Image (spheres, rainbow, N blue to C red):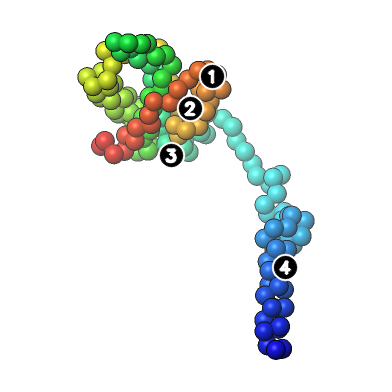
Amino acid sequence: MVKPLLKLYLFLYLISFSKTLFASSCQSMPLHIANKYSLHSLNAVDTASHAIKYSTKICACEILVLQSNYRRQKNFALFAEITKRKSLASDLSFAKRVIEKEKKRMQSFFYDKLEVQATVADATDCKSLYKKLKIKNKSLYLYDILDADLKR
């Protein structure tokens, strides 16, 4: 009778101890650990050259108007994302070639006419570029994000 009761107390103690370790605020951490992860110790540099130099993904985008026999659809974004390998210009040109191939497939299978409204390229991943474009244009639709690394 005593042994199961001790196991129960031990189990409850471990649960309460784990909650204080993992679910508590930063104030209960030791001071040297809390200062290591504070927001004031992080140095954020927001320059474009720093982003291009240290980014690992490059994204190219074309905003399209798609027209079939029955209707015309505006503001569809087609993205191609590539991992930065060589220079920015060569990677961007390869991503744009992937977009051009996909547009030819779209036109041969699904749509009668494709018009390019805008072209955007950035040294970031395509999800964050889509979020930036979506903030500017609420009626923007995501058609697809192509992985240009697979196309190599």
Query: Residue 124: x, y in percent?
Result: 46, 32
Q: How many dots with numbers? A: 4
Please identify the quadrant where the N terminus is shown. bottom right
Q: Which residue is mark 3?
A: 56
Q: Residue at x 31, y 25 (%)?
A: 99
Query: Residue 79: x, y in percent?
Result: 38, 27
**Mark 2 or mark 3: which comes first in sequence?**
3
Between the C-alphas of marks 4 and 2, the distance is 43 Å
- 9 or 151: nearer the viewer: 9
> Is there a contact, CB below 8 Å, between mark 2 and mark 1?
no
Query: Can the viewer see residue 80 in this picture?
Result: yes
Looking at the picture, which amino acid does disc 1 mark? Lys
Residue 28, placed above or below residue 135 = below
**Mark 4 or mark 3: which comes first in sequence?**
4
> Is there a contact, CB below 8 Å, between mark 4 and mark 3?
no
Q: Which residue is mark 1?
A: 138
Between the C-alphas of marks 4 and 3, the distance is 42 Å
Q: Which residue is mark 4?
A: 16
Q: Which residue is mark 2?
A: 130
What crowding class fits label 1: few (fewer than 14 Cα within 10 Å), some (14-19), or many (20 or more)? few
Residue 124, placed above or below residue 76 = below
Q: Residue at x 73, y 55 (%)?
A: 26
